[in-house]
């Protein structure tokens, strides 16, 4: 897949995607204010550059290797794919998951039926549990996912997505690096050691996930006003996205958006009206 991260707001009416910029992106090195007018069907809400999170303004530019977060509607997701130069990316058909824990189970259950999924788990008891819990279309393999010969036998070179979900962050990082070197386009690593996150991103291993930071978004949501119906952590971008319902006579309704005098670190990514 060409998308690193995907979130849906307002029942899916508004989409937020995170995409890493490669040389093929046509929007590189151009000030955001020059990329389009009022009718541009997307909004750049955040940029992750190395270890810095940028809430961009008109003069900011998108650079090579940035992770850029766009808001758009579902209709225009293909347009985003075009301007970031990822139309040539093959859609995922074959997936290998390394590790058979709870996240692996939930991931496998969410994967569409048309994808072929293999889970490699070295613990035979876990394998038996996976067999009981998951659909027959998902192949369970008892083996060590660190064994490159095993991965090659199971078709790593013909796999579009490799997901490393073992209990060991180092193993997940190294396995994704190996998969990348074998030509796998999409890799995902579970990294639970917070100290390793920046290193993992700098190694360009693909998408990094962390249970603690994902959970933090839900805790944050509970601490906020009840009018906040949805909060997402932009994982590793040091930012949050909140979905608000604006009440009648709220101060935000008294001015045009350009005149709201929002803090520089706040951005309105989109609005759904009468929808």
Image: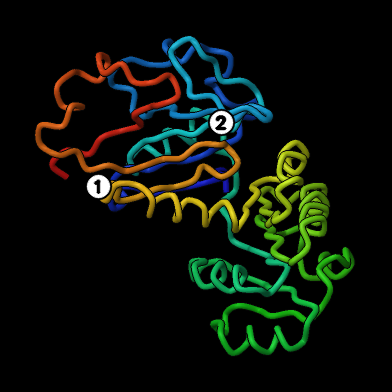
Query: In this view of the protein, which residue sits in the foreground, 140 or 260?
Result: 260
The part of the image, by quadrant, that contains residue 236 is: top right
> Where's residue 229, x and y in %?
29, 51
Q: How is the image coloured?
A: rainbow
How far apart marks 2 and 1 lie (CA) works out to 38 Å
Farthest residue, direction front: 223
Horizontally, residue 242 falls left or right of residue 207, namely left
Locate residue 148, reporting x and y percent.
88, 63
Other residues around mark 2 within 10 Å, as few (<14) / some (14–19) / many (≥20): some
| Marks 2,1: beta carbons within 8 A | no
In front: 245, or 9? 245
Query: Considering the image in quadrants, where does the C terminus appear?
Result: top left
On screen, 169 above or below 258? below
Q: Secondary structure at mark 1?
A: loop
Question: Residue 122: x percent and y percent?
Answer: 80, 78
Looking at marks 2 and 1 on the same chain, the residue that comes earlier in the sequence is marked by 2
Residue plotted at (64% across, 87% down): 129
In this rendered view, identify the residue nearer to me: 109 or 159: 109
The residue sitting at 38% across, 43% down in the picture is 15
Q: Is residue 96 left or right of residue 154?
A: left
x 53%, y 46%: residue = 5
For discs 2 and 1, the disc positioned in front in the rendered view: 1
SS for callout 2: loop
Mark number, residue 36: none
Tag 1 residue: 227
Quadrant housing residue 115: bottom right
Residue 91 x %, y %: 56, 52
Q: Residues within 10 Å of mark 1 (few under 14, many from 20)?
A: few
Q: Residue at x 63, y 27 (%)?
A: 52
Residue 85 marker: 2
């Amino acid at each position: 897949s060409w998308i690193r991260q995907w979130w849906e707001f307002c029942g899916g009416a508004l989409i937020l995607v995170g995409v890493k910029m490669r040389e093929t992106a046509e929007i590189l090195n151009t000030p955001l204010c020059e990329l389009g007018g009022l009718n541009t069907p997307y909004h750049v809400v955040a940029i992750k550059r190395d270890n810095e999170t940028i809430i961009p303004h008109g003069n900011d530019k998108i650079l090579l290797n940035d992770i850029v977060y766009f808001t758009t509607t579902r209709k225009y997701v293909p347009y985003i794919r075009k301007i970031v130069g990822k139309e040539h990316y093959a859609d995922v058909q074959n997936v290998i998951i390394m590790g058979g824990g709870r996240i692996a189970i939930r991931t496998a259950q969410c994967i569409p039926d048309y994808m072929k999924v293999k889970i490699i788990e070295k613990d035979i008891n876990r394998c038996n549990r996976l067999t009981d819990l998951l659909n027959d279309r998902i192949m369970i393999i008892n083996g060590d996912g660190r064994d490159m010969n095993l991965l090659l036998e199971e078709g790593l070179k013909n796999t579009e997505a490799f997901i490393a979900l073992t209990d060991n962050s180092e193993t997940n990082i190294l396995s994704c690096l190996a998969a990348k070197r074998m030509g796998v386009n999409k890799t995902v690593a579970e990294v639970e050691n917070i100290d390793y996150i920046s290193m993992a991103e700098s190694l360009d291993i693909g998408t990094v996930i962390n249970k603690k930071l994902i959970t933090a978004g839900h805790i944050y949501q509970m601490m906020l006003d009840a009018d906040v119906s949805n909060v997402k952590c932009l994982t590793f971008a040091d930012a949050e996205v909140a979905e608000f319902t604006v009440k009648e006579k709220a101060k935000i309704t008294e001015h045009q958006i350009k005149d709201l005098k929002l803090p520089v670190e706040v951005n309105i990514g989109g609005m759904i009206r009468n929808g």
